[in-house]
Amino acid sequence: MVANLIAGGFQGPVYPVNARAEVVLSIPAFASVLQIPGPVDLAVVVVPPDAVLQVAQQCGRKGVKGLVVITAGFREIGGVGIEREEKLRAIADRYGMRVIGPNCMGIVNTDPRFACNASFSATPPPIGSVAMVSQSGALGEAILADAAQAGIGVAMFASVGNRVDVTAADLVAYWGDDDQVKVILLYLESVGEPQEFLQVARAVARKKPIIAVKSGRSDAGAQAASSHTGSIAGADVAADTLLQQCGVLRVDNFRDMFTLAQALLHQPPPQGRRMAVVTNAGGPGILATDALVSVGLEMASITEASAKALRKVLPPEASVHNPIDLIASADAGRYRAALRVVARDPGIDGLVVLFVSPIMIDAAAVAQAIVDETRRLAKPVLACVMGRQRGDEALAILQRAGIPVFRYPEDAATTLRLMARRFRWLQRRPAKTPKLRVDRAAAARVLRAHRASAWLPASAAEAVLQAYGVPFAVSRRVRDAGDAVVAAHKVGFPVVLKAEAADLLHKSEHRAVRTGLRTGDEVLAAAQDLLARLRPHFPDVALQVQRHAEGHREVLLGMTRDARYGPLYAAGLGGVQVELLRDVVVRIGPLDGRDPGEMFAALKGAALLGEFRGSPAVDVDAAIEVLLRLQQLVGDFPQVQEVEVNPFILAATGRGSVAVDARLRIGT
């Protein structure tokens, strides 16, 4: 640590503190921080765990305002470690000290005016304009090493460890106001204070890009959830939607993080999805096309004027249609002539240039042609170079010009997709959430009557939701088969017959629903069968007779309240296959007026909600309104832990979309 502080160019005095050594690296040492004659701004604590609290206490008395606690042995070991960490927090609060760590690898600042390598990193990072935070000390070392290898210059780095005080959100806020920092990179194992992070990152991401690798994609706990919404909205889904909502670009690995950082540092974002590929080899051109389309981008249509200009400068065997194939004999001159046309085509939002070098073609000259013809272009240019002849020199020419270079087209496509996502997010502006007319008093009466409940009886859940304006299909609840027949005549045929009981959460698993019943005899037979089969297992079983809903599509609308992330709202294709299809989009509340519509538009099966095989388009606006009504209910009653309307049957506009089943859970 002392060696790194000195080698890192720190401009002030460095005081080694060691109770048993008189000298450290030829610098006189002190037995205690209290013996240091001058002021101390920062203390780097690298002592055994049992000594940390005493050292922190002494630093507080000395007037030190910043601690970097490298030492492990705190919350991560449980038991005594948790107690030790709480005491460290109390000491820091008492003396007004900010703390990074414990259990971290330190901090780095490369600005020559404030150079400070207070870390045990073996890799001094090159100076640059990227700031990084890592929640893992061990990975922090690898991140710095890989960044240096990738040519990423670092402005600041922090390993935050257990985050007893300083969090990723604190650092993002700080770097958001630092003009030296152009891009922020995060390695996250968890999001400590999700709502705080959401607010901070959303504000900072409008000023500069934030890229994150978030580990921990699995969530075994979701398998035990009682509702479809709870099962789907697991921890990683919550983390992923949190990052998306605040404009953070999530990537799967550090390689993608560094290439995306390079692209965002040096290239403008694509202002649309239309991409062009220029290549000298058909195979890589096809791979690039497939990769771009697979991530949701489009292959641009070359204008007739551009195609005509290309025909004049390319041989007859070349293709002037996207992907534009210059064929294997293409040299720097041909690349230059083609790019002069393609780069300026108004129908193109981004460009991928591929070069597979035959032995007789000078890769460095081709690279220089790419640089010359795309310089100062207001659209992104990415390159894939698989060259032999002067291939390393070609890479260096492109990288010096700020053109990201990839080994394979798939990686370039991933980077362009995320660049385009950032542009779209920056264009988005939130819309005001409408205040809807509801009967809050009626809902409150029902909820008060079930304060001791977990899952409300179906009739009570329906009453609460109807008070908040959620429309339901007409129904009656009865206890025996004869009354079911009477109820069917009252609601009108055809009807659906459902069994209900306190512990009967997933009706389809018990064959507890009968549909398409058109006569009293059919209702009687179905009711007798349901009661005979289910009463031995569910003594409180009752029957719901419900008018058949005349709709065309089933959707799910729901909310589950996460202990860390708050309300998670879900919208998706519903019915009994919801967990199998998992075509559900989740957002962290509060939703603004645009969120519900965007959630439905983001579904993989969004097209199924439009005109489909003779069926008319359905009234998605009705589902959007119900989702906003659920949000109003959740905001008015914090005791609502889960609520789900599934299925909500969407009819054509004006034909009366209705819910046919719902669940609601309350708790503290």
Image (spheres, rainbow, N blue to C red):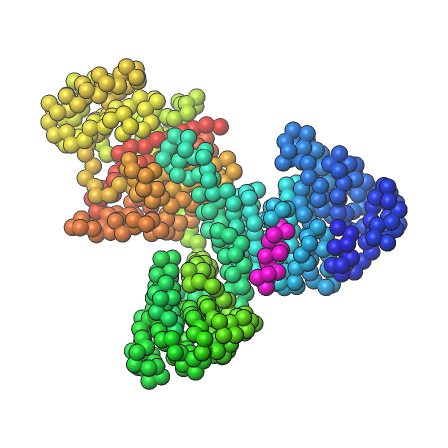
Comparing 1 with 41, the one in front is: 1
Decide: is 290 above or below 135. Answer: below
Q: Quadrant of residue 359?
A: bottom left
**Residue 119 visible, this angle:** yes
Q: From the viewer's perspective, tell me whether residue 135 is left or right of residue 324.
A: right
> Is most of the magenta stretch helix, strand or loop?
helix
Comparing 298 with 643, the one in front is: 298
Decide: is 432 above or below 330. Answer: above
Q: Residue furthest front?
A: 359
Q: From the viewer's perspective, tell me whether residue 636 is left or right of residue 545.
A: right
Q: Where does the magenta region start and end?
A: 140-152
Q: Where does the image place residue 246, in percent across and percent down from the top left?
A: 49, 51
Q: Quadrant of residue 498?
A: top left
Q: Where does the image place residue 568, in percent across and percent down from the top left?
A: 43, 40
Residue 415 colored magenta? no
Q: Residue at x 21, y 47 (%)?
A: 652
Q: Residue furthest bottom?
A: 312
Q: Where does the image place residue 247, in percent across and percent down from the top left?
A: 49, 54
Decide: is 50 above or below 151. Answer: above
Residue 142 colored magenta? yes
**Residue 492 visible, this angle:** no
Q: Residue at x 36, y 35 (%)?
A: 228
> What is the number of callouts on the image?
0
Q: Residue at x 70, y 51 (%)?
A: 119
Q: Residue at x 42, y 66 (%)?
A: 271
Q: Where does the image place residue 28, in percent across and percent down from the top left?
A: 88, 51
Comparing 609 with 651, the one in front is: 609
